[in-house]
Image: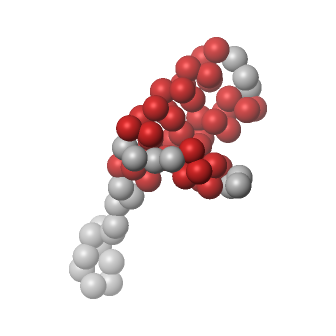
Amino acid sequence: MTDRNGQPPQQPSPRALAVQLAADACNAHQQQPDTYTLHRMQAAVDQARNLGATPQDIRAARGQQ
């Protein structure tokens, strides 16, 4: 698919995707706190941090400050 100028749509960066996945995992753990969601959240946050994200980035993606 292309835009009106014939350019492919912009893809989110790997860091932006990791931040959103970490935010989603944090929200899931907040709604259903158990060991499964805890480990998913920890892994997602670690991956985002490895790609250069900060905790503030993840909070912003969750809509918190």
Name the residue furthest bottom: 5
Going 67% across and 38% down the picture, which residue do you hit?
27
Q: Does residue 17 show up?
A: no
Above or below residue 16? Residue 43 is above
Coordinates of residue 19 in the picture (x, y in percent)? 49, 47
Q: Quadrant of residue 40?
A: top right
Q: Nearer the viewer, residue 1 or 38?
A: 38
Looking at the image, can residue 3 be seen? yes
- Give the image location of residue 36, x and y in percent: 60, 17
Residue nearest the observer in this picture, 15 or 65? 65
Q: Nearer the viewer, residue 65 or 25?
A: 65
* Image quarter in which the N terminus is found: bottom left
Q: Position of residue 38 (x, y in %)?
A: 62, 22
Image point (48%, 27%), residue name: 43
In the image, residue 52 sits, relative to residue 33, either above or below, namely: below
- Residue 7 x/y as whole percent: 25, 76
Task: Tell me which residue sits at (59%, 41%) in the image.
Answer: 24
Q: Is residue 61 left or right of residue 13?
A: right
Of residues 51 and 8, which is closer to you in this image?
Answer: 51
Q: Is residue 45 positioned above or below 54 on the image?
A: above
Residue at the far left: name it: 6
Q: Quadrant of residue 25?
A: top right
Q: Quarter holding the C terminus?
A: bottom right
Query: Quadrant of residue 8 in the image?
Result: bottom left
Count of all numbered marks drawn on residues in the image = 0
The residue depicted at 51 percent of the width and 47 percent of the height is 54
Asked which colour scheme the image uses, the reply is secondary structure
Direction top: furthest residue: 35
Compared across the picture, whether 28 is left or right of 17 comes to right
